[in-house]
Amino acid sequence: MSERDPDRAVSQTVRAQLALRDLILSGRLRPGERISELGAVETTGVSRTPVRMALVRLEEEGLLEAIPSGGFMVKAFTERDILDSIELRGVLEGLAARFAAERGVSVRDLEPLKESLAELDQLVTQDPVSMEAFSSYVAMNARFHALLTELSHSAPLIRQIDRASALPFASPSGFVMAQSVLPEAHQILIIAQDHHRIVVDAIENREGARAEAVMREHARLAARNLRLALRNRTHLDLLPALALVRSPVAE
Amino acid sequence: MSERDPDRAVSQTVRAQLALRDLILSGRLRPGERISELGAVETTGVSRTPVRMALVRLEEEGLLEAIPSGGFMVKAFTERDILDSIELRGVLEGLAARFAAERGVSVRDLEPLKESLAELDQLVTQDPVSMEAFSSYVAMNARFHALLTELSHSAPLIRQIDRASALPFASPSGFVMAQSVLPEAHQILIIAQDHHRIVVDAIENREGARAEAVMREHARLAARNLRLALRNRTHLDLLPALALVRSPVAE
DNA sequence: TGCATCCCATATGTATACAATTTTTATTGT
DNA sequence: ACAATAAAAATTGTATACATATGGGATGCA
């Protein structure tokens, strides 16, 4: 080991994993397509060993599927798989919210979540929302959910949520949304923000059941959102996952 | 590659993974303990490459933890981590039951579950239960839960449940239970069997909410069960997970 | 012309060799 | 005697070489 390109201090394995994951989520490697190790070696520039590691990790992650005769292929998901993943996430985040509420959260711990909520508020209340604003919303929303998950203070649960979220909320490079659906998206954002407010309030007041219920409802909203986007063939929110669906729907 | 011991047709990687997992779950590798690759090579008899694969898989599985400086250590769980895992499983299986109920299950699909239920019945109703009967109960119960999970017909959910169950319901070799707690265990089994009956009935009658609720209650029973076992320092049910707890409680 | 069999090529699974970092131990200085 | 530094040993990350299995293509036979 002598050379280390610009991005030093990153293991070859991680580099390969990131590169391959991006290839999959961006759709350049299509569902059902077999992944050649040698091909991956060429595209990633690292040796076979770290590539192999990355492949194993991506399989465990659920993005690849082992071929009985050997090797891996990009896993193909149905539309319902993605919708199920969203509901799944709702159930898990519901549990996280309930844990947070029941176990009690210190004012200090709740602070970051409230800040995130305020940030989102600032963005949602501006009318009309711009395209850039919507893009940054995606990141801010992810942060809110991550903070909420952390509040459960349950390592197994946090782990599981991270896992479950990989599918429907992946954010690959090519995230596009049609201008025409912006107003509709804004409406959805307003409702989503209501959910956010309610869950924070419920946690603060130690109402576990209410906290859980609203996160479940939140997921159902996301599912409706996705279904709508699928029908309209427009990228609304959380659409990147569609790259994983067997039959290309959008675009 | 010329030799292939008795168990042929099993890759070295899988062999190493099984061997190492057993070492971890049986407690011979203790929580926090660093895993030497060379050591693993010696104990498993395979080369470093498949050992390394197995280690990566076990890390993704949640049994190992990566050490920043390199290598892996056996992950250490707190007692609450295990309890959380049980509740987590309850929530996930609740969703599975709800999916099964809401989506409708054909009579043919429900058959295996009913058979499993009948098998469990036969075992639970005999009074008193023998030690052997209890042992086989563990396997039969696992089968019932697996069948139930499958009935959801949701690939992401099934995957997630398998993941979540790895921890608290692992069944390593050295599973022991004190004779003295057999009667008490029997009482718990009777309640658990009630839950099983209810969930099957709810699915059959397409009562999603009821199916979900009973599986959650079922998990709470398991959690109470575990807490009891922890206090009494006896192996009751699903105790193997204790091998993973940081400070050894039982034995 | 179609099908089956055999051979070759390619790709994966495994093993080992090499490089670099980390950890431990020993030695020296205060 | 203790601490700090340096050197050595061990361990991990990476690369490559080798063996085996699988798939495709070509050839021969029906």
Image (cartoon, coloured by chain):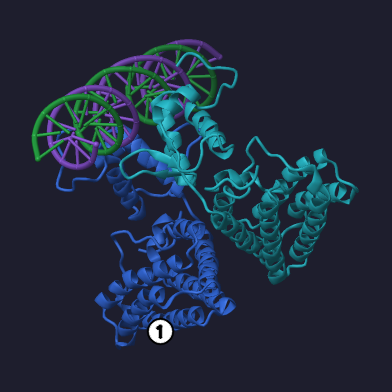
Chain colours: A cyan, B blue, C purple, D green
Q: Position of residue A102 (x, y in %)?
A: 67, 67
Q: Position of residue B235 (x, y in %)?
A: 36, 69
Q: Residues within 10 Å of mark 1 (few under 14, many from 20)?
A: some
Q: Is residue B6 above or below residue B181?
A: above
Q: Which residue is mark 1?
A: B190
How many numbered circles does the render carry?
1
Where is residue B131, by image quadrant? bottom left
Quadrant where the C terminus of chain B sits is bottom left
Can residue B233 be seen from the camera position used here?
no
Q: Position of residue B109 (x, y in %)?
A: 40, 73
Residue at coordinates 41% horizontally, 78% vertically from top-left?
B107
Can residue A220 be seen from the camera position used here?
yes
User: Which residue is more in the foreground, B128 or B60?
Assistant: B60
Residue at coordinates 73% horizontally, 45% vertically from top-left?
A138
Letter of the chain that mark 1 sits on in the rendering: B
Asked if residue B237 lies left or right of residue B19, the reply is: right
| Three-letter residue code for mark 1 | Ile
User: Which residue is more in the foreground, B96 or B168?
Assistant: B96
Asked if residue A250 lies left or right of residue B50, the reply is: right
Q: Position of residue C10 (x, y in %)?
A: 32, 26
Where is residue C27, by image quadrant? top left
Residue at coordinates 30% horizontally, 67% vertically from top-left?
B176
Q: Is residue A154 above or below residue A22?
A: below
Which secondary structure, mark 1?
A: helix
Quadrant where the N terminus of chain B sits is top left
Where is residue B134, by image quadrant? bottom left
Looking at this view, name the residue that lies furthest to the right: A127
